[in-house]
Structure formats: structure tokens, C-alpha cells
Amino acid sequence: MRSFARGLSVGLIVLMAGSAGAPAALAAETATSEGTSIAKAVVIKAPNELAGMDAERAWIKQHLPGYGLGEQRLVSDHDHMYDVFKVHTAAGETRDVYFDITDYFGKM
């Protein structure tokens, strides 16, 4: 029983460390991007669309606390694909947030 509990504890620590590392990596990768336009889009690198969508929402949560998501649209510009979210901030403002999703667009 003791070794099972120790194994469970180690497993939980590894799981928590893995999930805690994801937002830090995302923040480092997108630190210079504001997401306010296509030219300043937050570039998301992800292995597939599900992970990419999670990263988009994590970025919004980290950079726009108290947000509310509105509509989402897909925009194509030359050879890049973008997700654009209408976001309602806690201060009552509305703005669009642009994510460059070219890296994972269409990958399941």
C-alpha cells in the first residue's frame, strides 16, 4: 500500500509539472506578440488543433484576466491562417485577439 501511495504521489507530481510547464512555454513563445492585428498576431505552435485551441484560450486567460469570449472567426491572409476571437474584458471593453494558427491548422 505504501509503494502504491508513493507511486501515485510521484505520478501526480509529474502530471502537475507537465501541465504547469505548458503555460510558461506558451508565454515565452508569445511574449512579444500583442494579438491586436494580423501583423501582431500571437503565433501558436502546437501539434494539432485541440492543443492549439487550448493554447489560444490559455493565452487569453493569462493576458486578459476576467475575459469573456464572444464570436470566433477564421481568417486567411496569403499563406497564413488566423483565429480571431472577439473578447470582452473585465473592464467592459471589447477587442479582437488574433492568433496565427498556420502551424497546426488542419492537423487532427
Image (spheres, grey):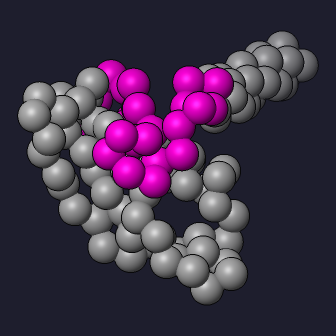
Q: Looking at the rendering, which quadrant does residue 76 occupy?
A: top left
Residue 72 is inside the magenta segment: no
Residue beneath the point at 39% across and 25% down: 45
Q: Is residue 26 visible?
A: no
Out of 25 and 40, give the one closest to the viewer.
40
Q: Is residue 37 visible?
A: yes
Q: Is residue 79 left or right of residue 38?
A: left
Q: Start and end of the magenta stretch? A: 28-52
Residue furthest toward the right? 2
Residue furthest toward the front? 39
Residue 30 is inside the magenta segment: yes
Out of 28 and 1, give the one closest to the viewer.
28
Magenta stretch secondary structure, dominant: loop
Residue beneath the point at 60% across and 75% down: 89
Picture layout, residue 7 above or below residue 20: above
Q: Position of residue 77 (x, y in %)?
A: 14, 41
Q: Position of residue 49 (x, y in %)?
A: 27, 37
Q: Is residue 70 left or right of residue 16?
A: left
Q: Position of residue 86 (x, y in %)?
A: 39, 70
Q: Is residue 44 left or right of residue 17?
A: left
